[in-house]
Image: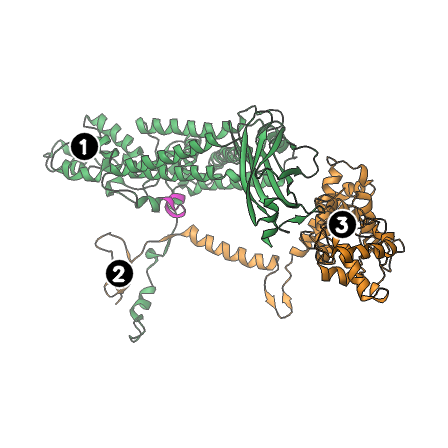
Chain colours: A green, B orange
């Protein structure tokens, strides 16, 4: 633009814009009307199940023996352990968590390519908690029309009372939400007692406070703004949908031209479609859009407009499904008067199958890794400063730091064995025999010495292979690790 | 160039900003107002933060911040807190009798861990980070000890040192420089005998004559069989370990010039618990008796 003479002249004048075209816009308050129907029932069920899981899980007990926590699901950050019922994850096994995250990602790909933003509409915490907050709002202030009236009314005692009641209930839900979160990170009954007696750690209170604040603000006031402006996932999802993705859509070829039912009786069917322009779909929408305008970035496919429209269609004695789960590839067929293909046709296609296979493979690998992992584990670190030590009788000694992991809930004795040139001997620092006791669920570091006599082959050679076996003397479980012995030839 | 800002884009129906470059029209999709407030809020927060915490670079250092926070003070606080936590076990270690301290005792574990740090800071310069020593500086990993390798002996050596002027209780012994006493031939004979003690290549006739010289001049400290004597710090000449090298020329050099290894008295420099900690650490490196 630099080559032109003052090219922005016009633009500058255009900057002085009329007030109605500001670059910023205030949030339009949305008051979704209550609705009944199969999707609403499904959403209530999912809400009950997900919230139930969230609140109840930390209180499930699981006996792991006297020295381990008895909480079924526990993220023990201080001791670096992750407990999930019968599974215990140590930090060096964190790949299980990475694997689960990959599965979660692939699962989202699968569901998005099959059913669009089904995660957003049904299972996302933002949607679930917003639904809960909306429920409270309706119980306190009444349905959509009452809420609209209350918004416009002056600050009377009645309004203050209703607002305070609503905010208090929201706040209680928010505190319960933030409160439940911290129970995943400490023994829940103890922490609950500590929280109330002001004995809990400051980080527990600050976590509860932050999550309370975000729940209260995001669920009560930000709502659809979170999905539209803050969440990155909807942007990614756009790239995962295709023509066969089932998503919430309006059959405009059936509904248009829209008109009032009263007029329809006088009109010819060719001129007036099934849509009676009752705005039910708009009034129930939690993100404040009109689905009849087509697929929109704001739509979280919660399907409540389907319920709302079906209710009206039924009342008018017309076919349901004016708003429905539709695939773009069926639009042409339907316009030609053919029936849409079945949902299964759209769901089972190469893309979703590949996602399913990848997802299942990931799961199988994780399960396999889970079942073959031993309950004891060793890591051998050769001490290489110095490479070896010459003893007074001319023998050559190498040292190894062996880390022993006992994942059992009780102390175990570990027996060492060396498999190498038979002239070599094994000795443990600080022990008279070849056994070490490792406390329950702990790691022990043991220095071991391997000694080759003065004139033996390994003492003279450069390097000799050797293998350490470690056996759990109680269960007989054995693990090994290979290492090297440095002789004089190393010099 | 600029159109009427109230004009609407024909495709989307969205209002335009009135900006138009080469036929590309900018649509006005308003940003939420709260987003703008969030931006202002972060700016205010940012300014407040730089006032509260050390931030702005000045000529002689950065602004201190009104909260008086400094990472240095935080580290000092952390150290003080850990010291306070350890004060009890430190006291136990300082007054412990090391030879009766069991490995399961928390004070033992504390001593070994702390001793490793003491060793790195004070001993590794001569004995090496891995305690393998160097020529003239004993290897602490092997089973040969000039002044004894029990816990009590190591503790004594650490505390009082060797051949130093600071501590009257320091280990002391001095080998004469035989270059001024022996003839060249006598030195060669003695060298051959010393080499024979550890089974190295030597001239048997020379060694036989050297044996006589050894018995008269060296055995008092190194013993009749050359096995050494820890009470005077005389090294064992019959084993495979040589502090100053075990080749013919090394041995000859040692006989002619003698050796005089010195170690500071760490009891004068380190705290009581540090002396004991480093003793425990050295003892469990593989050679402790």
The residue furthest right is B168
Q: Which residue is mark 1?
A: A341
- Please indicate, yes or no, whether residue A149 appears anywhere in the rendered image: no
Q: Position of residue A342 (x, y in %)?
A: 20, 30
Q: Which residue is mark 3?
A: B238
Q: Is residue A290 left or right of residue B136?
A: left
Dot 3, crowdedness within 10 Å: few (<14), some or many (≥20)? many
Disc 2 to disc 1, C-alpha distance: 40 Å
Disc 2 to disc 3, C-alpha distance: 96 Å
Quadrant for the N terminus of chain A, please: bottom left
Q: Chain of mark 2?
A: B
Q: Position of residue B7 (x, y in %)?
A: 25, 58
Looking at the rendering, the stretch of residues picked out in magenta corresponds to A226-233
- Which residue occupies the foreground of this view, B160 or A369? B160
Work out whether mark 2 precedes mark 3 in sequence or the reverse, and give the earlier one.
2
Dot 2, crowdedness within 10 Å: few (<14), some or many (≥20)? some
A372 shown above or below B202: above
Residue A227 counted in the magenta span: yes
Q: Which residue is mark 2?
A: B25
The answer to whether mark 2 and mark 1 are in CB contact below 8 A is no
Locate residue B109: give its quadrant.
top right
């Amino acid at each position: 633009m630099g080559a032109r003479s003052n090219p922005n002249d016009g633009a500058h004048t255009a900057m002085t814009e009329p007030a109605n075209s500001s670059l910023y816009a205030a949030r339009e308050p949305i008051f979704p009307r209550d609705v009944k129907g199969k999707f609403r029932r499904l959403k209530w069920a999912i809400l009950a199940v997900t919230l139930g899981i969230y609140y109840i899980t930390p209180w499930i007990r699981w006996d792991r023996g006297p020295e381990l926590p008895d909480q079924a699901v526990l993220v023990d950050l201080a001791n670096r352990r992750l407990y999930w019922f019968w599974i215990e994850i140590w930090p060096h096994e964190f790949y299980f968590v990475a694997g689960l995250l990959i599965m979660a990602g692939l699962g989202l790909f699968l569901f998005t390519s099959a059913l669009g933003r089904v995660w957003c509409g049904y299972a996302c915490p933002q949607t679930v908690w917003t639904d809960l907050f909306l429920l409270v709002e309706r119980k306190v202030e009444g349905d959509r029309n009452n809420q609209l009236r209350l918004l416009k009314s002056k600050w009377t005692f009645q309004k203050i009372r209703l607002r305070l009641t609503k905010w208090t209930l929201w706040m209680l839900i928010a505190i319960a939400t933030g409160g439940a979160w911290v129970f995943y990170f400490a023994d829940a009954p103890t922490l609950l007692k500590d929280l109330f007696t002001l004995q809990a750690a400051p980080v527990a209170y600050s976590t509860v406070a932050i999550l309370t604040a975000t729940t209260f603000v995001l669920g009560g006031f930000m709502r659809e703004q979170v999905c539209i402006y803050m969440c990155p996932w909807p942007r990614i999802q756009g790239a995962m949908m295709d023509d066969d993705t089932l998503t919430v859509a309006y059959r405009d070829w059936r509904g248009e031209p829209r008109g009032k039912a009263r007029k329809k009786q006088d009109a010819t069917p060719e001129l007036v479609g099934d849509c009676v322009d009752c705005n039910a779909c708009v009034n129930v929408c939690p993100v404040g859009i009109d689905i009849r305008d087509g697929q929109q970035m704001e739509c979280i496919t919660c399907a409540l407009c389907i319920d709302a429209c079906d209710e009206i269609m039924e009342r008018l004695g017309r076919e349901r499904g004016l708003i429905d789960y539709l695939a773009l590839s069926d639009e042409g067929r339907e316009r030609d008067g053919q029936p849409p293909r079945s949902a299964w046709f759209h769901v089972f296609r190469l893309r979703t199958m590949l996602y399913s296979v990848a997802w299942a493979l990931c799961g199988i690998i994780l399960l396999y890794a889970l079942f073959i992992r031993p309950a004891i584990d060793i890591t051998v670190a050769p001490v290489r400063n110095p490479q070896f030590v010459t003893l007074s009788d001319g023998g050559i000694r190498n040292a190894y730091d062996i880390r022993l992991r006992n994942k059992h809930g009780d102390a175990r004795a570990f027996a060492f064995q060396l498999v190498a040139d038979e002239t070599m001997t094994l000795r443990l620092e600080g022990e008279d025999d070849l056994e070490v006791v490792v406390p329950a669920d702990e790691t022990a570091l043991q220095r071991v010495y391997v000694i080759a006599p003065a004139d033996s082959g390994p003492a003279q050679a450069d390097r000799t292979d050797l293998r350490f076996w470690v056996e759990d003397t109680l269960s007989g479980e054995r693990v090994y690790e290979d290492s090297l012995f440095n002789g004089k030839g190393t010099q | 160039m600029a159109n009427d800002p109230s004009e609407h884009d024909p495709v989307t129906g969205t209002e335009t900003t009135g900006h138009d470059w080469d036929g590309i029209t900018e649509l006005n999709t308003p940003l939420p107002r709260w987003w703008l407030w969030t931006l202002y809020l972060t700016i205010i927060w940012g300014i407040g933060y730089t006032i509260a915490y050390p931030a702005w670079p000045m000529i002689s250092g950065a602004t201190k911040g009104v909260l008086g926070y400094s990472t240095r003070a935080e580290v000092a606080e952390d150290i003080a807190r850990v010291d306070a936590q350890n004060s009890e076990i430190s006291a136990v270690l300082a007054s412990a009798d090391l030879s009766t301290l069991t490995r399961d005792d928390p004070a033992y574990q504390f001593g070994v861990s702390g001793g490793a740090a003491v060793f790195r800071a004070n001993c590794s310069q001569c004995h090496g980070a891995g305690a393998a020593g160097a020529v003239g500086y004993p290897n602490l990993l092997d089973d040969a000890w000039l002044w004894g390798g029990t816990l009590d002996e190591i503790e004594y050596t650490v505390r009082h040192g060797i051949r130093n002027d600071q501590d009257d209780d320091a280990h002391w012994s001095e080998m004469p420089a035989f270059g001024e006493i022996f003839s060249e031939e006598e030195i060669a004979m003695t060298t051959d005998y010393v080499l024979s003690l550890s089974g190295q290549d030597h001239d048997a006739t020379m060694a036989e004559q050297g044996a006589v010289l050894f018995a008269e001049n060296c055995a008092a400290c190194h013993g009749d069989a050359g096995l050494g004597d820890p009470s005077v710090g005389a090294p064992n000449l019959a084993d495979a370990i040589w502090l100053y090298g075990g080749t013919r020329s090394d041995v000859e050099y040692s006989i002619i010039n003698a050796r005089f290894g010195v170690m500071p008295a760490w009891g004068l420099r380190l705290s009581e618990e540090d002396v004991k900690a480093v003793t425990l650490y050295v003892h469990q490196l593989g050679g402790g008796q």
